[in-house]
Amino acid sequence: MAIRPILICGPCSAESEEMVLETARELKNLVAPDYFRAGIWKPRTRPDSFEGVGEKGLAWMKRVQEELNIPVITEVANASHVEKIAEYGFKAFWIGARTVANPFSVQEIAEAAKGCSIKVFVKNPTNPDIDLWCGAIERFQKLGFDEIVAVSRGFYPFAETKLRNMPCWEIPIELARRMPELKIICDPSHIAGDTRYIAEIAQQAINLNMSGLMIESHCCPSNALSDKSQQLTPAEVKSLIDNLKMKTSAIDDRNFETKLESLRSKIDVLDYQLIDILKQRFAITNEIGEIKKSRNVAVLQIDRWKKVLESRSEYAEKLGLSRELIAALFSEIHKESIKEQQ
Ligand code: PEP
Ligand code: MN
C-alpha cells in the first residue's frame, strides 16, 4: 500500500479573501491537503515588492480552517506574529529561510509560542549551514515542543543553475542522521523556482524518504503577486501527486528498499557534484588556453601532463582506488581539455 506524504498546499501569499477561499476549495476537492498554507507577512528581498496583506488575511485563513476544515499554516517572523496567529486559532506555523538564520528571532518565536499546542515547521536557512538549522530546531526542542518538522527548501545557489535554490540533498540527509526521530519534508516549489522542475524535485525528495511536501498552489498563478513562476494550479498539484512514485510499505522488503534508495540518492548527489566539479575544471583549463594563446605558448605541455597523471594516479592508489581507472579517467579529461584549448 502506498504511504501518502504529508501535504501542505496553498499560495505563496494570501492576496484576497476570494483567491484564498477559491484556492483552498479547489485544493480540498482535488488533493485534500493536510494543511492549507499562505504567507500573510512576506519577507521580500526588495522593499518595493508585495509584502503580504498582513493581519486582515488571518481572518480569511480562519474561514478556510472553519468552513473547509483544513488546518491552516503561515510564516511567522516575530513574537507578535505568533500572538496574532494564536488568536486566530492557527494549528501550525513555519519559520522562513531568512528568519531561521537569526537565533534571536528563533528564540523570540519559540518563547512566544511556548505552551500553545501548535505544530512548528522549521525551514532551512538559505546558507548551507546545517548547525544553524539544527540550532533552530533545538531551540524549540528545549522549550518542550514535540511536534517539530524540518522543511528542506534549498540553499542559495552560488553558481548559475536551472533551479532557484540548490537542493544540497546531503544536508537534509545529514539532518536525518543527526536527528532520526525528526520528520523532514521538502518544499520543491522554492527549490525549483519554476513550475517545470517541481515534479522532479518532489520525486527526488520522496526517493530520499522525506515525509511530505509543501507545494505552492494558486487558483490563477499568472495573477500571483509573489513567486508567480513557481505556483501550480490545484489541478497541476493533483497531477503531480498522482504521478509520484510512492514508497511501498511492504514490510518484508522495507529495510532493504529504504537502504537501497538512500544509497542510490547519495550516489545521485555525488554524481552531480562530480559533473559540477568537472564543469569548474574545464572552465579553468579554458582560461589557461586563452592565456597560452595570448602568449603564443603551445597547448600541450608534456611535462605538466606527466606530473598531473602521475600525482593523481599515486593519490588514488593511496586511497585504495585503481591506479589504472584514475589514469584512464584523467586521460579522457586531458584529451578534452586539449581539444577545447585548440
Ligand atoms: C514561502 O514559503 O513562501 C517562503 C517565503 O519561503 P522561504 O522562507 O523558504 O523562502
Ligand atoms: Mn513563496
Image: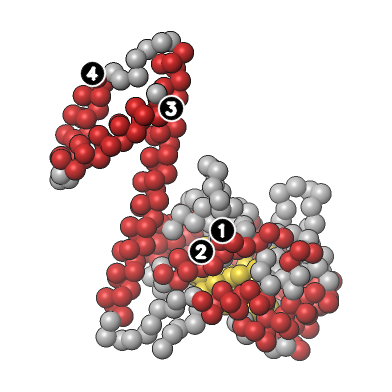
N-terminal of the pair, mark 4 or mark 3, is 3
Q: Amino acid at mark 1?
A: Ile
Residue neighbourhood size for the residue with mark 2, other residues' Cα within 10 Å, grouped as few (<14), some (14–19), many (≥20): some
* Residue displayed at 45% across by 24% down: 287
Where the C terminus falls, by quadrant?
top left
N-terminal of the pair, mark 1 or mark 2, is 1
Question: Which residue bears the numbered disc 2?
Answer: 201
The vertical placement of 166 against 314, above or below, is below
User: Which of the 4 image quarters holds residue 262?
Assistant: bottom left
Q: Amino acid at mark 4?
A: Asp
The vertical placement of 290 against 153, above or below, is above
The x and y percentages for residue 316 are 19, 40
- Between disc 1 and disc 2, the foreground one is 2
Question: Which residue bears the numbered disc 4?
Answer: 303
Left/right placement of residue 209 relative to residue 267 reads right
Residue neighbourhood size for the residue with mark 4, other residues' Cα within 10 Å, grouped as few (<14), some (14–19), many (≥20): few
Question: Which residue bears the numbered disc 1?
Answer: 191
Report, in whole angstroms, how far the alpha carbon at label 2 lies from the one at label 3: 32 Å
Question: Which residue bears the numbered disc 3?
Answer: 286
Q: Amino acid at mark 2?
A: Ile
* Residue displayed at 40% across by 29% down: 340
Q: Amino acid at mark 3?
A: Asn
Residue 140 in sight here: no
Q: Are marks 1 and 2 in contact (CB under 8 Å)?
A: yes
* Residue displayed at 71% across by 82% down: 26
Left/right placement of residue 248 relative to residue 73 reads left
Determine the secondary structure under disc 2.
helix
* Residue displayed at 46% across by 54% down: 168
Report, in whole angstroms, how far the alpha carbon at label 1 lies from the one at label 3: 31 Å
Residue 60 in sight here: yes
N-terminal of the pair, mark 4 or mark 2, is 2
Taking depth in this image into account, of 161 and 340 the one nearest to the observer is 340
